[in-house]
Structure formats: structure tokens, C-alpha cells
Image: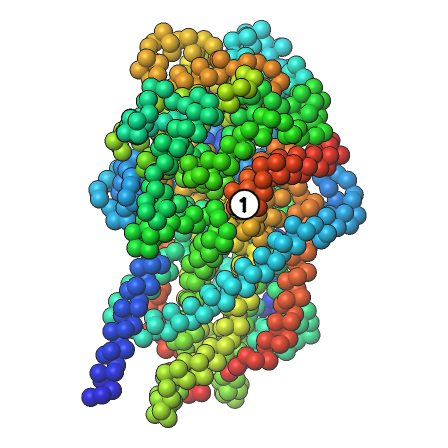
Amino acid sequence: MYMKTRKRIDTLFTEIALIIISLIVFAPLLLAITISFQTPDSVFSYPPKLLPSTFYYDNYINAFKTIPFARLLLNSAIIAVAITFGKVISGILAGYAFANFKFFGKRFTFSFLFATLFLPAETIMIVPLFLIMNQLGWVNTYWAMTIPFMASATNAFLFRQHFQTIPSELEDAAKIDGAGPMKYFLKVLLPLSKSMIAGVVIINFVYSWNMYLWPMIVSMEDKMKTVQVGVKMLISGEGTNNWGVIMAGTLIAVLPTVIVFLSLQNLFVKSLVRSGVKG
Amino acid sequence: MKKFFVILLIVSLLVTLGMAKTKIQFWHAMSGWRIELLQNMANDFMELNPDIEVEVQYTGSYNETLNKLIAAIKAGTPPHVVQVYEIGTQSIIDGGIAVPMQDMIDKDPSFDIASLLPQVLNYYVVDGKLYSMPFNSSNAIMFYNKTMFEEAGLNPTKPPATYEELMEACKVLTKKDANGNIIQSGITWNLHSWFFEQMLALQDAPLVNNNNGRTAAPTKAVLNDDAALKFVTLWKELADKDYMINTKKADWTGARKLFLSQSVGMLITSTSDVAAIMSGALENGFEVSAAFLPTPADSPQGGVVIGGGSLWMIDGNPEDELEATWEFIKFMSETEQQITWHKGTGYFPVRKDAITQLLNEGYYSEYPDHMVAILQLLFSKQNYNTNGAIMGIFPEFRNTFEDNIERMLNGQMTPEQVLEDTEETATELLEEYNELY
Amino acid sequence: MRKLLPYLLLIPTFFVIIAFIYVPAANSFRMSFFRENKFGTKTMYVGMDNFEKVLFDPEYLQIAGFTLLYVGLSVFLTIFLAFLLALLLNKNVPGTYIYRAMIFIPYAVSPAIAGSLWTFLLDPVAGHVNYFFTNVFGTQIAWLTTRPYAFYALLLATIWKMIPFSLIFYIAGLQSISNDLLESATLDGAKAFTKTWKIKFPLVSPITFYLVIMNIINAMFKSFAIIDVMTRGGPGGYTSTMMYKVYLDAFSYQKTGPASAQSVVMFLIMAIVTVIYFVYGERRVHYR
């Protein structure tokens, strides 16, 4: 009985804490939603509003009118799916190499890969990368927006860390059963990594979905641009901004990532990775 | 049979000729509804010139557009027309990547350069040559909340015209609660060097030497004068007494928000904001009017400098494409387009006849506040100081000045130190820049 | 086959990073010894000049100091809060599905928009936060324009943006701790505190090891966007980081040479930090 009450109090406190925290974290987004339903000028009224007082959905219509959202969403989807796919696969393969093999040059290759994270790619490397794309004839194509991002130290390192937590007894057992390293990788390691893969997919998807500067530089037509460029099309640095439309555009652009998150979050939570294996 | 082949040949030739459209790329930095506006203008142009195809592309902010331009030029694939901000003028000229507008104008008698507003022309003419086509021009004006003025016992038809009057008005407008928190304050403008530049020109003072960089490349910043000190001191006094609320750097929205939420009684901002301020005031239930920028009572009379952007014709494209580009640029500067642009954006028209036509239409009796910006510009004395400084390091100059103003507002610098340090840093930057050209 | 396999596994990754990261980076490295005008029409060899300019500049040293403080604090707070939040979210109380989404969504918002939203909330007079502060505490703070509040505001926005990344991997990591282990600990009478810090935390240490260094890299290299929209490095350069300076020099002023030199400096700093981190850190990580 005592245990049960304690458990209930614990649940109650957790619940309250989570409500407060998630509301604080979500507050800016709540503001975005509110603004997206306000008329353009009431955004600035005082006292400030956090909840919508009107339901002015014209902002959404205007956002769709101002920018070719359908095409931009499609571009972003193509780019994000391609990059995520490539990045996760290359990352898993590299992570497996670093975690489960001893080979000549392992330290060097790992450092060489890791060092790419110390380069401020988004600033000084844009022009040289553009010149490479131009030589390859990739300017204004999906290639330029996807291929250069299909591998990263971030994923390789994460999977290295993750594979190292999987007991080596499993690998020994597989060997005894006569399974080769690829078979062990496909039949044992991957199924045990579902939650990590789901997490990485979410992170990679959001990262590539949010790419902005590079697609802007390397696209030469409005129809090749991404949804983040679309949102930017609504914002002006100096001129007058229609914040209602901007927030409507932002929410439209955020929605697909939220859907990806919601559909994957069960995957990385329910799969109790090591349930069969007792450490 | 022979005849048939001749006809076939002619027909196919005509078809290919008809197909052979000259394609030109137009990169611009105008967001929001202005994207559609520009696209429509380009569509009108294509209808008139079926052999030219204009690919309009929004290329991000001015800065992003500039970076994209640099990448394209280094790759040898330059676009044809690019919109560049006014402070980029010198560095594009120095880069030698553009075909001066003057070269095209000299070849084309159908274009009358005298039809452009001299106040605008004077900014973009360098060494007697017009380098780019003025397109979107603005300057700074002051808006004030008439309702608030009335409530505070100020004359709502007489906005402050001098620094002294401004100080007085702000004092009356500022209200605090028992804890010393600001409930209402006098004025705001976003923390931007542009306003400083305007205030110097209004007092007929230069920013850099060599006649504001217009007779030779500037080698020194010249901020060691009364004009600069008066404005920076005013800024500090207003802030110290809470008569002014400061935003972060270049926070145009923040300043507008303070004004529209009636947290301040006055706002200095760009003329391209007129329409938004008017409708915002209506929504929030107060009356607003526009006024000229204030100046110190005893200062020499200068004028405002135009801001905004212009259209550049980029070199490195074949001759026939350059011709098509010129046709397009010419079209964009025509009266009708300039009127469309003015009405759609609030940037003022860059042509005299456009203004005359708008006056005749009665547009300004309907929107008198649009007129204030134009009058302020027309009343501006024209000389090197009011033509505006040009220098290759303008973006850095601005950042240096703004950093120092922030230091002053946080009590780390005096107005004298702000000017001294800005002058010193800018001079160093100019020296470095000049080594490279 | 087993000898060759790891090399084959690395081919895709190395193809991409060499062609699209190292080749352009080599160009940038070369540029650190040059100065060039905007359109590359004049290039000047300047030797170590670009490096000397930053290394002997007191302003740059101050920026480096701030970077250290900013990176250190934001990484520590992010890791700590993300782990605690992951624990709460792993209790699977009703509504967890929603809370998790609400905490994750900020990650998907672009920095430009995030910055605008925070700027609205933190407006000196008409903002939500100050409306609350004046009415409840009777104080009014100029969050984004005064010291030290600009730093607090920036830190808040940075952590807000960084937490979801760590949170996701902590949640995934905590899921894989076997329940048996925790149950046996509970039977042993382990207190909640012990269970958390002596059992759970060490068990996810490979993830923590990963997250600490990744967050350092993030705060070091990726945060310029949020700084640009929150404070623009102000007031008076107070919240400028090394990367923000690279961004300004490279992107706003197109000074490739100095920006490249600063990037080399940052690269070296990170290389040293990482070597130390791997040598000392990896010993303490609890694998398998």
C-alpha cells in the first residue's frame, strides 16, 4: 500500500513538473501560433497576448499566396529524405567499422573524420564549395543540395558510441554460430539499435529540413528553393513585416518535422533494446 | 519542289528566331508581397518584349544576395541584374564587375537621365558617372502619436523640430510607476548607424574625408565635429533620462512595436514604413502623423541622404544579353513602374514625372504622410555632405559605430569616446581596404 | 575479408568528407595567409599577418574569454537539464507523448524565427516577460541590450534550442538500460538519488561522452545564428563569440583572409580540447 501511494505521489509530481516545463519551453511556439491567428496590426497591441483572441486564418491563405509552398515543401522533402537516408547509412557503416573492428589507421581515420566538425562550414567554405559544384555542373540541382551532406562525423561517432554499449558476448556468440561480420551486423546489431536509429533519423531530418543558406546560394530558380527559403521570403530585414503571415509560414514549415517526430517517437521509446539480453 | 524547300527554310528560321529568347536573370532582395509585385512588373516587361525572358529570383537579404553574387562571379556564371543596397555602391564599383549605367545611357538617346530626381541621382553618380539605376529609395522620417501628444498637453500639430524641443516633448511624454519602471516614454529609433548618418547630413557635416569619398577614395573618417557630438550626446541624454527606449542593433520591428503599442510617443524610421505605421495606428486606436527629422536649433541646414537600393548590371555576359538587360532596367525605371512600386511599397519614386503625376492624381492629398518623406528630400540642400558618404567598408563602419553606441548606453563610453574610437577604427579599416584596390 | 571490411565500410563517408569538406577547407586554409578583396580581383600574400591581427588584439582575447564562458555554461546546463528531463519523460506518466513533442518542437524552428519570437517575448516595455516582471516583481529589465542580461537571455535561448538534441539521445539511451538492473537495485534498497546518479548516469555515460563533445561543437560553431538574431553580439560586443566574429568577417564583410585565419585558430583550439577530452574522458566512460 505504502509503495503504491508513493508511486502515485511521484507520478503527480512528475506530471506537474512536466506540465510546467513543457509550457515554458513551448511558450515561444504558443506565441507563434497566437500571432499566426492575429490580424497584422494587433500583433503589436499592449498588454501583450499569449493566447489568440481572434481566429484570423487569412494569414495562412496569404502565406500560401505569397510563396509557392507546395513546390518548396516537395523540394525540402526530397532533400531531407535523401540526406537523412544517406547520412544514417554512411554513419552506421562508419560507426560499425570504428566500434567493432581493429584495423590499421583506425585512430588516424577517426581523427580525420572527427576534425571535420571543427570547420565552420557555413561561412568561409561556401564559396569554394560553390566553385566545386559549378565544375561538377551541379548548380541548381538536387545533387548539390544533398550529396555534400550525405556523410558526417556526427552520425559515425554516435553509432560508434552506441555499438560500443552492445555487449561483445553477442558478437562472440554470433561467431560461434558461424555468422560472418555482415550477418551479425544486419541480424543482431541493427535490430538492437532501433531506438538510436530513430533518434538519429529525427535529428538528421530536422537538420536537413532546416537547411537555408546553402540551398539559397546554390539554387538559381525560385522553384528549386527550400521551405526555409520560403519562410525567409516572408521576412524582411528592414522593411515592414507582416508577422501574422510569417508565423503562419513558420508553422507550415515546422509541421512536417513535427509529424516525423510524432511518428518516430514511439519507435525509439517502445523498443526495449536489450530486453532479451541480460547484462 | 525548290520553292517548297525555300519556304520550309524560311519557316524554320522564323521558328528558331522566335524560339531564341534572350534569357536574363534578375536577383533581388525584396521579400513578402514585394516578390509578387516585382514578378508582375517583369511579366509586364516580357509581354512588351516577347523576345526577352526575365528570370526573377529572390536571393535572400541584401547581404545574402551579395554573397551569392560573389560566388557566381568567382564561378564565372554572373547574373544580369542584381539589386544591391546603397552602402555596397563603392565596393561594387571597386570590384569592377558591373557595366556602368552611364555607358548604356550614353548609347541610348531614348533615355533621359534628367528625368530622375537629382537628389537620388546625386547618390549614385560617382566621379560624374551613374553606375547603377536607382530603384528603391527611402529616407528617415519621424512619426508621432498625436493622441498621446494631446493627452500629455503637447500641441499635436507642432511636432518637435529641434533637439531642444525634442528633449522637452520627451520629458512631458515620459511616465513612470512607483518603482521607477517606464510606463510610457518619449521616443525610439532602432539602434542603427543609418540614423546617425542622416543626422550628420542634416547638419551639413561629412562622415569621411575626400568630400565624403566622392572626389577620391576616403582615407579617414571625420567624426570629430560638433554635428556628430550633438547627436550622440542627445542620444545619451535621452537614454539616461529614460526619455528614449533603445532596441538591439537593427531591430526595426522592435522599434515599430514600441511605437504601435504606445510605449513611446515618437518613432524615427524609414519612409518605407509609412503604410504599416498608418494602419497599425488605426488598429491600436491612435492618431499618427509624420514629421521631418529634428535638428539642433543652431546648426547649419543640410539635408537627408537617401537609403535603399539600386539595380546593377553585371558584366561578363554576352553583348545581346547586356542589351536585353538594359531594356529591362530602363523599363523598371519608367514612370508607370515607379508609381506602381511607390504605391506598393512606400519607397518613393525616383523620377520627377512620377511625383508630378501622383500629385495630379491627387494621391498625396489622400496620403499626405507619404508626401512628408518626399518633401524632406526635396528641401534637402544638395552637396557632398547630403549626397551621402560612399566607402567600401560601410557595413563594418556601421557595426563599429553601433557597438560603441551600445557601450555608451551601458555606461562604458562617453559620447566623445564613441566618436573617437569609431573614427580611429574606421580609419584603420579604410587603410586596409585601400591596400586591396 | 574481415581485414578489408572496415575500409569498405568507411568508403562512403570518406568520399563525401574529402570531396566536399576537405577540398574546400584546404582552400580556406590557404586563404588564411592571404588577403583578398570582395570579388577576388586582387589577392595579396600577407604571411602570418591575419593571425597576428587576431591573436594580439585585446578585443579578440575578450571574445575568446566570452566564448569559453558561453560554451562552458550552455553545455553544462544543457546536459544537466536534458538528463533530468529525460528521466522525467521516461517515467511514462500520462501525457508523456504530448510533453515530449512540446519540448522537442523548438528544435525544429529555424534560428531566425526563434530569435524573433524571443525578441517579442523579451521586449523592454511591451514584451510578455517584462509585463509579467513589472506586475509581479515590480522590475523591468532591458533583456537584450544591457549587461549582463543580454548574456542570460542568450544563454536561455541557446539552451532552449540545444536541449532537444541531447534529450532525444538520453531518452533513447535510458530506454536501453535493462529494467532488471534497476529492479535489482530497488530491491537492494537503493535510494532514488543513488539510482539516478550511481546507476543510470554511468550506464548512459557513452551517450553523455558523445553529447558533451557534440554540444561543445554546437555551441562553438553553430550558435552564431541564434546570437545574430538575439543580441547581434551586443551590447558593445559583449555577447560576441569567436564564431560570430568569423560569421561577420566572412559573411557580412567578405573578408575571407581574416575569417579563414580565425577559423584555423578555432580549429586548433578544438583539436586540443578534443584530444584532451578523448584521452581523459574515454577512460571514465563505462562501455558494455
User: In the rendered structure, which amino acid carries the disc numbered 1?
Assistant: Gly
Compared across the picture, whether A95 is left or right of C176 comes to: right
* Residue position for label 1: B411
Label 1 marks a residue whose chain is B
Tell me the residue at 44%/57% (across/down). Answer: C156
Above or below residue A63? Residue B94 is above
Above or below residue C51? Residue B384 is above
Q: Give the secondary structure at mark 1.
A: loop
Q: Position of residue B431 (x, y in %)?
A: 73, 34
Compared across the picture, whether A165 is left or right of C13 comes to: left
Q: Position of residue B272 (x, y in %)?
A: 42, 26
Query: Can residue A262 be seen by looking at this rendering?
Result: no
Rendering quarter of residue B405: top right
Q: Position of residue B151 (x, y in %)?
A: 28, 29
Quadrant where the N terminus of chain C sits is bottom right
Asked whether B425 or B316 is in front, the reply is B425
Tell me the residue at 46%/65% (across/down). Answer: C78
Tell me the residue at 40%/21% (across/down). Answer: B291
Mark 1 neighbour class, 10 Å CA radius: few under 14, some 14 to 19, many 20 or more: few
